[in-house]
Amino acid sequence: MTYFKLFTNCIVSKGIARSLICDLQRQSSTLIPNDLVAIITELDSATSVEDLFRQYGAENRETISEYLAYLTENEYGFYCESLEEFNRFPPMSTAFSGSGKITNAVIEVSEDMERNLGTILEQLNGLRCTSLVLMFYRPMDIDGLQSVLERFDGTEISSVEIVTAYHEAVGADFLKNLNARLTPLTSILFYNAPFDRTDPWDRNIYFDVRFSRSNIHSFKHCGIVSAAYFDTNFPKVLEAMNHNSCLHKKIGIDIHGNIKNCPAMETSFGNIRETKLAEALEHPGFKQYWGLTKDDIAVCRDCEYRYICTDCRAYTGRTHIDTGGLDTSKPLKCGYDPYTNEWAEWSVHPLRQEAIRYYGLEELVRNNE
Amino acid sequence: MNKAEQIRELARLHKDQLPLNFQFMEIIELEAERKKLTYTGKSLLSARHPFHIQVKKPCKALIRIL
Ligand code: SF4
C-alpha cells in the first residue's frame, strides 16, 4: 500500500469556497480548490492512495492523479511505502509561545511624550517588547530623530519603525545621516510627501524607506486589510491560529498618553503619566481580545486567508458580539468576500456606512476617493 | 574607537558580504560566540564573516495605514 503525507510545515486553511495551502518554511501561500482539501484530509487520516482511488471511482481517477502530481511537484508532500513509514511523521505542533509579556508596541508620540520616551522604553524593555512603531504626526528633523533613536541604546528592542511627516530636508543626506549610527531602525515612512515611492533596498541604508502622498494625521488610517499585508511565516501563522493576530501581546499608547490595546481603540487602561505599562497589562480587561482568533470572527472564520491575514478590532463592521461581550465582527476595512472570492472597495459597501459614521471615518473615506 | 564605532566600521568593511535584506541589528562577534560553543567545537556562524547580523523585522505588519 502507498500513503501520502503532507509535509508538516504545510498547513491547509479551508475556506468556504476555496482553500489556501501555506508553506511555512518557504513562506508562500497558494490557493487550492476545496476538492483537493478533501483528498488531503483523507490521505492525512492514513487512507492509502489505492483505497482513495477505489473510494472515488474510475470517473475521478484522472483528477486525483492530477492533484497528487500537483502536491508532489510543488513539494507539498511525499509518498510513503507503508503505514509504518507514514506513522513516522507525526504532525507538527501548532502551539505558539514566547517569553515576552509584550512583543510589540505602537506609540503615538506627542511632543510632551517625546521628552519622557526614555521611561516608556525602559518599561517596554522590561516587558521584553522587541518591536515598536513610533508615530509622529509632525515633521522631525535629523537631530530629533537621532536623539529618539539614541534612547534605544542598551535596550533589547530590535525593530523600530517610524512614521513621520515629510519635509524639505528629507533627502539622500538626511537618510545617510540617520544611517550613520547603529540603531534598531528597520523602516521609516514619510507621509505628506510630494510623491509616492518605496526605495529599493540599498546596501548603504539599513532600513526601508517609503514616501507617501497620504496625509496621516491620526491612527484612524490603520486597520487596512489587503493582500499586501498577508504574511506566511511560522510565528505569524502559529500566532494567528492560537491568538488574535493583531492584538496579542500588543500595547498601544495614544497621543494623550492613554494605555490601550491599540491607539485607535476606545478603552483606556490608565495614562502613562500615572500608570505603569505592567500595571495596565494586569488590568482584567487588557487581554480580553488576545485569545480571539479568526476562527471566532464572523465571515473571517469562513475565509481561506484567515491565518495569514492580520485582524483589526479597532474598526469592525459592528455586526456581531459574542456571549462574553467581545466584538466578533469582520474588520471594517476588509473588502474581501470569502463566499464569492472577490475583492471590492470596503468603504462603498452599503452595510458599512453606519460603522463608518460610528467611527467618524467619513473624512478619511472621502479623501481616499 | 568605542564599541559602537568599531562595530560600525566592521559592518562598513564587510557590507558587501551581507546577505540581501539583512539588517544591522544584533552583532555577535565570532570569537565570543566560538568560546561559547567550544563544547561542540563548532560554530554555527560562517567563519568567513567576522560577525553575524540578524534580521529583526517583526514577522507581521504592526500597523496597516496605507
Ligand atoms: S474576510 Fe478579510 S479580514 Fe477576514 S480573514 Fe478574510 S481577508 Fe482577512
Image: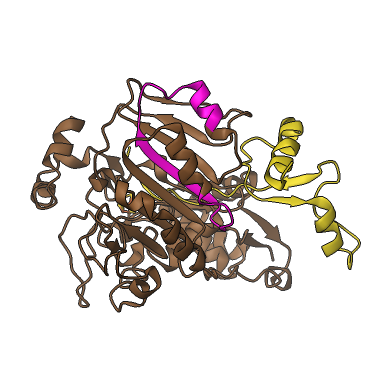
Chain colours: A brown, B yellow
Q: Position of residue A200 (x, y in %)?
A: 53, 26
Q: Position of residue A69 (x, y in %)?
A: 61, 46
- Quadrant for the C terminus of chain A, please: top left
Q: How many marks?
A: 0
Tell me which corner region of the image, top left, top right, bottom left or bottom right, holds residue A293.
bottom left
Front residue of this view, candidates A176 and A72: A176
Question: Along the horizontal axis of the image, is A229 left or right of A272?
Answer: right
Tell me which corner region of the image, top left, top right, bottom left or bottom right, holds residue A183.
top right
Residue A266 shows in the view: yes
Q: Position of residue A41 (x, y in %)?
A: 50, 64
Question: Along the horizontal axis of the image, is A347 left or right of A20?
Answer: left
Residue A56 shows in the view: no
Q: Residue at x 56, y 66 (%)?
A: A44
Q: Residue at x 50, y 45 (%)?
A: A149
Q: Residue at x 73, y 30 (%)?
A: B16
- Find out whether residue A166 is within the magenta segment: yes
Q: Position of residue A285 (x, y in %)?
A: 28, 75
Q: Residue at x 32, y 20 (%)?
A: A194
- Find out whether residue A306 is within the magenta segment: no
Front residue of this view, candidates A328 and A299: A328
- Quadrant for the N terminus of chain A, please: bottom right
The magenta stretch is A151-177
Question: Along the horizontal axis of the image, is A288 left or right of B25?
Answer: left
Residue at the outermost right position: B41
Front residue of this view, candidates B18 and A292: B18
Question: Along the horizontal axis of the image, is B11 left or right of A206?
Answer: right
